[in-house]
Amino acid sequence: MRILVLNGPNLNLLGVREPAVYGDRSFAALEEMIRKTAEEIGVEVELFQSNHEGALVDKIQQALHTADGILINPAAYTHTSVAILDALKAVALPTVEVHLSDISKREAFRQFSYVSLYAQKVIYGKGFEGYREGLQWLSETIGKETQKHAD
Ligand code: CA2
């Protein structure tokens, strides 16, 4: 089972700025935690971060041939990107949307998510732990689907 983990714009700055909102751990530490969790759960992960909307759209399209599920923190594109929503709908893979912060308690413009119109599960406000929960959920959900088709 292979999961594509996507991180959107500015998440590469984790730990460098705004520790009160996003914590003081670095983006490298987040990626390390994701790889370690994937190994524990027994899934393969491909990690991709970009500050560019089109690059994220391209990666989502490629997932059609390379992944069984998607874990995505679209960052600011969460609240603006119909293109990312359309790409996710087009590839139609099981998808979890994750946010480090509790977007439901922040500015009004962060409380609407285009990606949530497709994602089967949305996790927010749990920091790095949200990525772990998302990977776990995807592995269980995809596992059940695979089993159903085998029966
Ligand atoms: O809480 C989240 O994970 C967000 O997706 C993070 C995005 C924000 O636009 C969303 O509303 C919620 C921002 C990511 C930027 O990350 C930074 C990290 C360190 C310093 C500055 C920005």
Image (tube, rainbow, N blue to C red):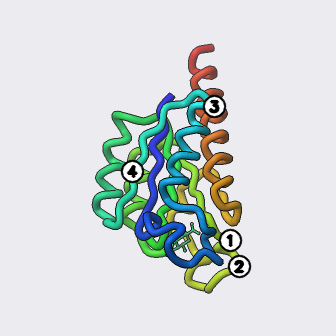
**Tag 1 near tag 2, CB within 8 Å:** yes
Characterize the local packing of mark 1: few (<14), some (14-19) or many (20 or more) Cα atoms within 10 angstroms: some
Picture residue at 65% right of the left edge, 27% below the top: 144
Characterize the local packing of mark 4: few (<14), some (14-19) or many (20 or more) Cα atoms within 10 angstroms: some
Tell me, for residue 102, which label it has, or none: 1
**In the figure, is residue 51 to the left or right of 4?**
left
Label 2, label 4: how far apart the Cα atoms are: 27 Å
Nearer to me, 111 or 82: 111
Cβ of mark 1 under 8 A from ligand 1: yes
Label 4, label 3: how far apart the Cα atoms are: 20 Å
Q: What residue sits right under mark 2 in the picture?
A: 105
Picture residue at 49% right of the left edge, 32% below the top: 44
Q: Amino acid at mark 4?
A: Phe
Nearer to me, 22 or 96: 22
Tell me, for residue 48, which label it has, or none: 4
Q: Amino acid at mark 1?
A: Asp
**Tag 2 near tag 4, CB within 8 Å:** no
For marks 4 and 1 on the same chain, the one whose residue lies earlier in the sequence: 4
Picture residue at 52% right of the left edge, 61% below the top: 26
Q: What residue sits right under mark 3 in the picture?
A: 40
**Tag 2 near tag 3, CB within 8 Å:** no
In the displayed structure, 28 sits above or below 125; it is above
Horizontal and vertical percent position of residue 66: 36, 34
